[in-house]
Every structure is written in C-alpha cells, then in structure tokens.
Image: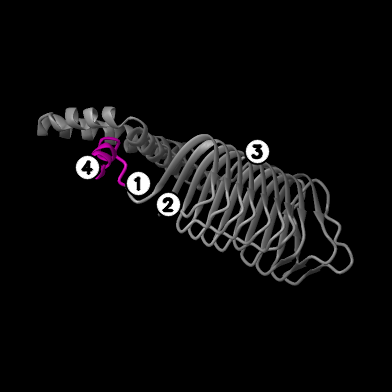
Amino acid sequence: MMVRTCALLSILLLPLSVLGATLRADDSLSIKDVVQGNAYLAGAEIEITAPLPADLLATATLIRVFSQVAGDVLIAGGTVSIDGDVLGDARIVAGQIEVTRSIAGEFAALARHIHTESLLQEVRVAGGTVELLGGASGPVTVYGNKVTLGGKYTENVRVVAADSITILEGTQMAGTFEYNAPQEAVLPEGTAVVGGVKYIGSSSFLPTPEEAQAFAIAGFGIYFVVRIVAGMLAVGLLVGLFPAFSNMLVKETTRISLRHGISLFVLGFALLIGVPFLTLFLAVSVV
C-alpha cells in the first residue's frame, strides 16, 4: 500500500502523503468512530460526530460538523454547518454557511449566506447576506450585499456592502469601523466604536491595482490548494477502490527509462506548476 500510494503521488506530482489518513467516499457518510490522521471525505451528505485529531478536507451537498476539529478545515459544499470547535483555520466555499462554535484560527469564507454566532478570530468573508453576530478578536474584512454586525470586536472592522449595513444594539468595536455602503449605517443606542467611524460612501467597487494583485495572488493560492486536495482525494480513492489498476499503473510507470521518466516529470511539472504560475504572472503584469 505504501509503495503504491507513494508512486501514484509521484506520478501526479503531489508532494503530500495520504498515508495514515482517513479516506472515505459515499452517498451518505456518518463519521461516528475515532479516525486516524487527516480526514478526507466526499459524498452527498456528511455528518461528523467523532472528534477529528487533525485536518478535515471535505466536499458534499450537505456537511454538518458536530465535533471538535484539532487541525484546519477546508470544505466545499452546498450547505455547511460548523457546530464543533475548530482549533485551526477554517476555509469554506458553499451556498450557505452557519458557524455556532469558535474557530481558533482564520475564518475565510465565500457563500450566498454566511451566519456566525460564536466569537471568531481573524475574519475574511464575502457573500450575499453576511451575519456576524458573535464578534471577533482579530481584524475583520467583509464584502457582501447585506451585512449585519453584532457582538464585540477587538480590532479594526472593514465592510464593503452593496446594499445595506445593520449594526445590532450593544455592538462594541475597540478598533476603527470603516465601511463603504450606499447609505450611512445607523449606530443604535449602546453601540461603541472606540477607534472611530470612517464612512467612505458609495464609492466604486472596482478594486485598486494593489487590491487586484492581492486578489490574483489569493485566487491562485486557493486554486492551487484545491487542485492539490482534489488530486489527493483522487489518489486515495484510486488506491482504495481500484487496487489492481493502481498496481498495474505503478508497474508500468516503473518500467520506463530514467530519461523518459524525467521528461514526463518535467512535462507534468510544467502543466501543474508552470502554467498556473505563468497565468498568475500575466494577470498581475496586466493589472
């Protein structure tokens, strides 16, 4: 198993190992037992009630996490619910996201609807409707159509809203509150902004050249991570579901000459690494 998996990873130019990890794929997954290492899950519906000792990488139409995740979380899905503490970072792309427990690291999300009720750390989110009701102990950046803020924020808060911004009663901000919206936000009674409020107004939502470059670099990073994760899941499933085919593929690969193998490696490296880097370079140069 180890030799076959390592060989397949080398073929696909993925310098990461799935050994010692939990790989599962099914229409409906229920993780109730203790798992080993990172958890790589794929299906239509995923429910996790067992504590995860490391990272969680999952994709499904419906994902519900009720237990603690000791590492990072990377999820792509339709509806995602985080009802267990996350001790690392959480990066989620989904249609709807709900977070009711704490996230110790950075929370980065992109969704049509984002709703959080717990205290977060650093927050970087974008969505149609964004509701941050539990506050944050780190810097907060929000891009959305309708944005609602509540709770206590210990650092600066920056919001860009295409429609409206709602500040709930009792919201506390220790840093500055900078926002861009068609109309000024109403600060209800009991709201305090220690660092001051800066209303930019209904300015253009087009990014500056510096922001465009930052978005291009961030987009490439997300693309590269997703591509690696997809390859890891594909390798794991290939090894687990088709062991005979995996053995044959490894044997055929090891029979080629060293020169031919190096040529294939260079070609694969160019396709996997060179093309994305070239695309990023051209995008940044044009901007």
Q: Give, as a three-letter code, the residue at label 2.
A: Asn
| Labels 3 and 1 touching (C-beta < 8 A) | no
Q: Give, as a three-letter code, the residue at label 3.
A: Gly
Query: Which label lies toward us, 3 or 4?
Result: 4
Where residue 232 appears, as percent x and y from the top left, is 38, 40
Q: Which mark is residue 95?
A: 3
Q: Give, as a three-letter code, the residue at label 1.
A: Val
**Mark 3 vs mark 4, CA separation in Å:** 39 Å
Query: Which of the 4 image quarters holds residue 179?
Result: bottom right
Q: Secondary structure at mark 1?
A: loop
Where residue 269 appears, as percent x and y from the top left, is 28, 36
Q: Which mark is residue 38?
A: 2
Magenta span dominant secondary structure: helix
Residue under label 4 = 3
| Labels 3 and 2 touching (C-beta < 8 A) | no
Query: Which label lies toward us, 3 or 2?
Result: 2
**Marked residue nearer the N-terminal end (2 or 1):** 1
Location of residue 184 with respect to 251 vertically, above or below: below
**Marked residue nearer the N-terminal end (3 or 4):** 4
**Mark 1 vs mark 4, CA separation in Å:** 12 Å
Q: Secondary structure at mark 2?
A: loop
Q: Secondary structure at mark 3?
A: loop
Location of residue 243 with respect to 152 vertically, above or below: above
**Marked residue nearer the N-terminal end (1 or 4):** 4
**Mark 3 vs mark 1, CA separation in Å:** 28 Å
Is residue 223 in the magenta section? no
Residues rendered magenta in the picture:
1-15
- Count of numbered badges drawn on the protein: 4
Q: Which mark is residue 18?
A: 1
